[in-house]
């Protein structure tokens, strides 16, 4: 076995045998599933019950605002100032909606008072309801008859179809694409961060424990650095594969459970004619599962591996250089921020990319090597043209070759330097230094 | 024959000249003392020999041919600042380090077993390094240095961290390795072990060689005709061409004097003079120790 191979093997075995690795590998999918469950649960669960008092001086709205599942509107006849005061002392009432006398063409002056900020959902809900009522009122005033008005209203559910060059039409679902993109880019971000940090820590430890001095007569510094980077990458991939296998196993177990339930309910329907709505809800769950078929899972998986490796090598090399330059982890802080900033920035830009997955911003962020791993994973489920993918991957490869080369030059000097005050100037000096 | 020949090696780091035209040979099958104060350039020179760094000019010959990358496998290097993977088992660690030096796994295992038994640490082979005492860790590092039977062994402060018993054990091992044909470069600040072990010495100071040669020649060179005489009762030794450097009265009225003999006199003249006056107890030449030579050579320029 050559020397890099020996170093990779040592790095890999030492890390995979660690208790923390084994625990994280087992707990990872469970924790992740738990986290997702909490997110889905809180997104779909009903909010707290809220009572909103309404003082309607215009007379248009009296008992017209429909209660929702969480908000009850109570129309009262009272003085606004007094009610405002009572709002401060009462916990039972969430807020006061004051509608003054209104000009329908210019409905100004509607105010909502509450002791706590109502949140976008509540505010939007109230606005939408009032708007609807005013529109109804105006339509009614225009002399159209009610039947016509009802006819004019349209309920639209857009079905988006993606056209491809081959002429295939595939049904796309932004929600699913978003979910897949978000989860994969988040995972990628996490993997690059966690394993990149491991490189840095490992290099600093080798330097401070001086084991490096013992090995350096038998191995080139570059071999040592690459061995460590590749060894840790192998650990990351192992964890990823184990997670994927375990998650697949978990999902197939749960889905087979659902499947059993489905057949059971169908039997019940045929026997007793159970509520049709319930069945429909169940079928919808199945729709979601069938939609995952439309996202090209192999492409996503292969791209994930490529972008994980590429992004990891790009950042990992830089972090290895930092690890070699400092004497302790605490000293590394000042260099960490500029290096991890593009990674954090790409996480922040995700919301913008989602809005326009094929916009200029999304395009450039998914081409530039420092942001491309996270952003491209987000864009991928939205059908990225092949040439963009190819360009992005080639630039990423060029990018990590460049950072690895740079890191190697700093590393070969850094590992021998103890007690030097390291700043960017020193790093630049080491970079150009001959050995 | 010289196993290693340093041919006009220079190295500078920026403005700092670390080595300035260093030139010397290391005879095969000798213990070679590489001496010098801190920062003299010893570590730089060792790193050039082990090809960790490259000289700016000059070259290193190994067996009379320019040293090649694969020659490094024939070197065992114990650096001054050394460490081990703390969380790794002793045996795994040694096998890893041995294989990095190009040994096959079975060869490595056999050699490690041999050395661990020899140094009496076999019971610890399955322990993590962090569970070992400092002395034991030093033994592991010594084994890592010699495990591949190198023909050139470079030991930088090999005795640090050892108690006197274990230091002696290592000393014996060094001599045994030499007997078996190895050449040893030995760098230390412990002059008594240089005195004891080294055949050849080079002293580097301010990136230049100040002293180089066989230990006994150097010691001869630094003899300055000073003798230590012990005799009964006080007698006037000076004024007769002898210079008394130091006098001390011992027990039983024995006087001990350090006497420097001028160029026109010999030690016989001193003996004759003393015996003519009183009873002589002993007379010995004061041979300078390596420690004295080191201090007298390095000191004057140290105040720059």
Image (cartoon, coloured by chain):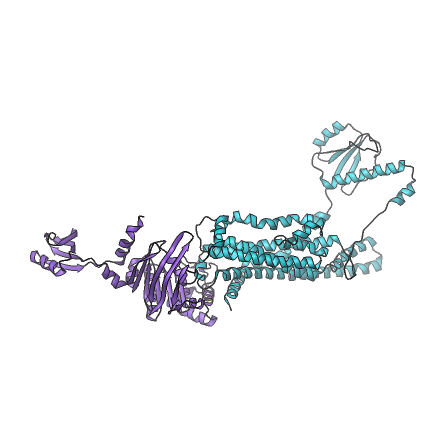
Chain colours: A cyan, B purple
- Residue B2: horizontal and vertical position, in percent? 34, 68
Where on the picture, by quarter, is residue A292? Answer: bottom right
Q: Quadrant of the N terminus of chain B?
A: bottom left
Q: Which residue is nearer to you in this view: A156 or A254?
A: A156
Q: Is residue A270 visible?
A: yes
- Residue A33: horizontal and vertical position, in percent? 66, 55
Q: Is residue B32 left or right of residue A52?
A: left
Seen in the picture, residue A87 relative to A252 is either above or below; the reply is above
How many numbered tags mark residues here? 0
Q: Which residue is nearer to you in this view: A126 or B216?
A: B216
Residue at the left extreme, as displayed = B276
At 63% from the left and 50% from the top, the residue drawn is A346
- Residue B228: horizontal and vertical position, in percent? 17, 57
At 35% from the left and 63% from the top, the residue drawn is B185
- Residue A278: horizontal and vertical position, in percent? 80, 54
Where on the picture, by quarter, is residue A106? Answer: top right
Where on the picture, by quarter, is residue A290? Answer: bottom right
Q: Is residue B51 left or right of residue A264?
A: left
């Amino acid at each position: 076995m050559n020397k890099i191979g020996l170093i990779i093997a040592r790095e890999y075995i030492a890390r995979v045998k660690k208790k923390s690795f084994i625990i994280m590998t087992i707990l990872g999918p469970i924790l992740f599933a738990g986290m997702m469950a909490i997110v889905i649960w809180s997104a779909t669960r009903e909010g707290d019950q809220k009572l909103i008092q309404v003082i309607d001086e215009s007379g248009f709205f009296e008992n017209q605002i429909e209660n929702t599942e969480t908000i009850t509107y109570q129309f009262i006849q009272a003085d606004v100032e007094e009610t405002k005061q009572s709002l401060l002392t009462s916990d039972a009432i969430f807020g006061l909606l004051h509608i003054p006398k209104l000009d329908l063409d210019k409905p100004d002056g509607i105010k909502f008072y509450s002791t706590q900020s109502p949140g976008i959902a509540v505010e939007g809900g109230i606005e939408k309801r009032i708007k609807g009522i005013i529109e109804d009122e105006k339509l009614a005033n225009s002399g159209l008859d009610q039947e016509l008005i009802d006819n004019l209203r349209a309920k639209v559910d857009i079905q988006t179809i993606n056209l491809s060059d081959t002429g295939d039409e595939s049904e796309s679902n932004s929600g699913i694409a978003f979910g897949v993109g978000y989860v994969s880019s988040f995972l990628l971000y996490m993997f690059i961060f966690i394993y990149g940090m491991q490189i840095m820590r490992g290099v600093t430890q080798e330097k401070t424990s001086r084991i490096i001095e013992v090995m350096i007569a038998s191995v080139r510094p570059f071999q040592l650095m690459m061995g460590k980077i590749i060894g840790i990458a192998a650990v990351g991939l192992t964890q990823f594969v184990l997670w994927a296998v375990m998650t697949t196993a978990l999902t197939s177990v749960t889905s087979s459970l659902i499947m059993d339930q489905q057949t059971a309910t169908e039997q019940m329907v045929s026997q007793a004619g159970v509520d049709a709505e319930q069945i429909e809800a169940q079928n919808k769950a199945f729709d979601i599962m069938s939609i995952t078929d439309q996202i090209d899972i192999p492409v996503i998986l292969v791209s994930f591996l490529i972008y994980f490796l590429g992004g990891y090598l790009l950042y990992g090399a830089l972090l290895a250089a930092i690890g070699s330059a400092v004497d302790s982890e605490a000293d590394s802080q000042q260099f960490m921020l500029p290096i991890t900033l593009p990674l954090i920035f790409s996480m922040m830009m995700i919301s913008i990319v989602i809005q326009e997955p094929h916009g200029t911003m999304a395009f450039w962020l998914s081409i530039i090597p420092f942001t491309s791993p996270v952003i491209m994973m987000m864009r991928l489920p939205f059908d990225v043209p092949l040439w963009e993918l190819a360009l992005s991957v080639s630039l990423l490869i060029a990018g990590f070759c460049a950072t690895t080369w740079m890191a190697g030059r700093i590393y070969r000097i850094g590992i021998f330097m103890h007690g030097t005050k390291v700043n960017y100037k020193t790093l630049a000096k080491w970079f150009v230094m001959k050995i | 024959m010289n196993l290693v020949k340093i041919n006009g090696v220079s190295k500078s780091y920026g403005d700092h000249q670390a080595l300035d035209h260093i030139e010397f040979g290391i005879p095969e099958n000798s213990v070679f003392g590489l001496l010098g104060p801190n920062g003299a350039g010893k570590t730089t020179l060792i790193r050039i020999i082990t090809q960790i760094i490259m000289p700016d000019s000059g070259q290193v010959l190994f067996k009379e041919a320019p040293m090649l990358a694969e020659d490094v496998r024939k070197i065992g290097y114990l650096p001054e600042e050394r460490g081990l993977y703390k969380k790794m088992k002793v045996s795994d660690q040694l096998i890893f380090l041995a294989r990095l030096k190009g040994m096959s796994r079975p060869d490595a295992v056999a050699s490690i077993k041999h050395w661990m038994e020899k140094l009496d640490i076999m019971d610890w082979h399955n322990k993590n390094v962090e569970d070992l005492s400092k002395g034991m860790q030093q033994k592991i590092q010594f084994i890592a240095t010699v495990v591949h039977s190198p023909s050139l062994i470079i030991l930088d402060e090999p005795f640090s961290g050892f108690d006197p018993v274990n230091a002696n054990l290592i000393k014996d091992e060094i001599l045994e390795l030499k007997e078996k044909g190895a050449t040893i470069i030995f760098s230390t600040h412990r002059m008594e072990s240089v005195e004891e072990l080294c055949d050849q010495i080079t002293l580097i100071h301010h990136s230049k060689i100040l002293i180089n040669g066989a230990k006994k020649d150097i010691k001869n060179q630094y003899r300055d005709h000073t003798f230590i005489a012990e005799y009964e009762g006080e007698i006037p030794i000076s004024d007769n061409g002898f210079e008394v450097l130091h006098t001390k009265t011992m027990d039983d009225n024995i006087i001990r004097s350090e006497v420097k003999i001028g160029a026109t006199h010999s030690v016989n003249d001193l003996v004759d003079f003393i015996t003519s006056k009183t009873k002589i107890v002993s007379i010995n030449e004061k041979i300078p120790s390596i420690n004295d030579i080191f201090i007298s050579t390095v000191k004057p320029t140290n105040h720059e």
